[in-house]
Amino acid sequence: MIRANCSARYSHPISLALVMATSFVAACGDGSPMGPAQEIEELPRALSLSEEMVIDAGNDFAFRFLDEVYRSAPESNLFLSPLSGSMALGMTANGASGNTFQEMQSTLGFAGMTLNQINEGYRDLIDLLRTLDTSVELGIGNSIWYRDEFPVKGDFLQRTQDYFGAEVVELDFSDPGAPEIINNWVRAETEGKIQEIVDSPISPLTVMFLINATYFKGSWTQRFDAAKTTTADFFSIDGTAGTVPLMEVEKDFLYGETDSYQAVDLPYGGKAFSMTVVLPKPGHAMTDLVSSLTPFAWAQIVDGLHNRPGTVHLPRFRMEWESLLKGTLQAMGMTDAFDPGLADFSGMSELAQQFQLHISKVKQKTFVDVNEDGTEAAAATSVEMSLTSVPMPFTLRADRPFLFVIREKFSETILFAGIFVEPSEG
């Protein structure tokens, strides 16, 4: 796991990817034993070109991903992690070829980028987040778990280790304890917030899991006053009213407003990381807001935020969310990867084509707890790779004519070659 102390605010599009895609947890900050966090005013270095491209692609994927998931259940609570999903699928794309890679590339927003640029962008972004703000803890963990004796190409594994910091583990999936081993890793990476991502027992056709776990820990820069939290009405989409604990804070915040929405930026720690709340005004539907979001539209919202004194009322809430994302990703244009007859993961294993290696399941689980001190959340995304049939033990019975070659395998030098047609005497 990459775990770092990091928290400030950007006008650069990176702010969305982090607000929507990482996990948050209350920690030190104003009023903590460590005292107020030091405000972050700029990035410690210039963004690399690959990093900028990955950030822009991640924001594009984030809005399309959010829209697709939200439209499937607009009356349900939703908390997802585009960053976690993008990173797990980004690792997987390292083993994809042909049209399978092109569809994954387009769905993730990486059209026009080479695999090397994608990988370098992830590596640089992770490196940036590790050291950005000492008042916030950020963890990004990646791992690959593959069935023992299943041949996985070394260069594929090496790339995931070099660029994603992935832990690579060969495991006996037939062992009843295998799912618990993987799930224990997820629990550790998410501080116990995500308890399980791999089902038990593991299917005999499953040969690999590629997993991302993301964890963030930071308290509000301006904490809500618990004494001011009251029980208040909350009106759902259909107009029915329930009640929520409604928190209150009165400070200077970055705030923006148009005819259709209000927006406020609630920073954590040193203000590198924040929760940007966008509230549609009465008469304006949430579905319209979500469907209108693009990187450009989001940049307009962020650019419209200006420092103003004000009062923010925000519900205290806790939520868990889980979804299988196959249908979502297919609707976004990533189809071949799930089709055993079309998927091309020949960059992952020499058996990929013979046994139709494909993505059988993409699962994401998230957790969020928003309270007066801060926000606690976690996300885990698992990409499950399966075969259409299990490679069976073979028997070769040389009881008929056969060719044989004596060779040096590294230089590929053939020393002798022969054909055995019938037994000779003597």
Image: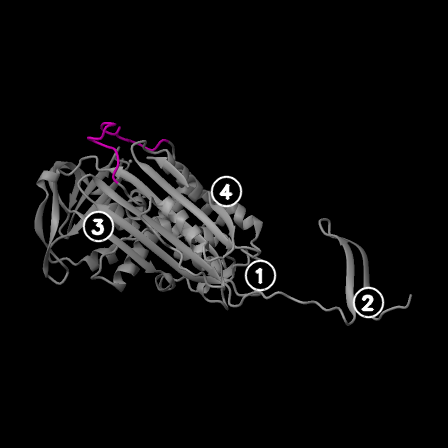
Marks 3 and 1 close (CB-CB < 8 Å): no
Looking at the rendered structure, the kind of residue marked 1 is Leu
Tell me where residue 391 appears, x and y as whole percent: 57, 65
The residue pinned by badge 3 equals: 318
Q: CA distance from mark 2 to mark 1?
A: 29 Å
> What span is colored magenta in the figure?
26-44
Q: CA distance from mark 3 to mark 4?
A: 36 Å
- Foreground residue, 395 or 279? 395
Q: Earlier in the sequence, mark 3 or mark 1?
A: 3
Q: CA distance from mark 2 to mark 3?
A: 73 Å
Secondary element at image label 1? loop
Q: Mark 4 or mark 2, which is nearer to you? A: 2
Tell me where residue 136 appears, x and y as whole percent: 30, 35
Q: Earlier in the sequence, mark 1 or mark 4?
A: 4
The residue pinned by badge 2 equals: 420
Q: In the image, which disc is placed on residue 162? A: 4
Q: Residues within 10 Å of mark 3 (few under 14, many from 20)?
A: few
Q: Is residue 266 above or below residue 169?
A: above
Residue located farthest toward the front when viewing the structure as drawn: 176
- Foreground residue, 272 or 374? 374
Q: Residues within 10 Å of mark 4 (few under 14, many from 20)?
A: few
The residue pinned by badge 1 equals: 351
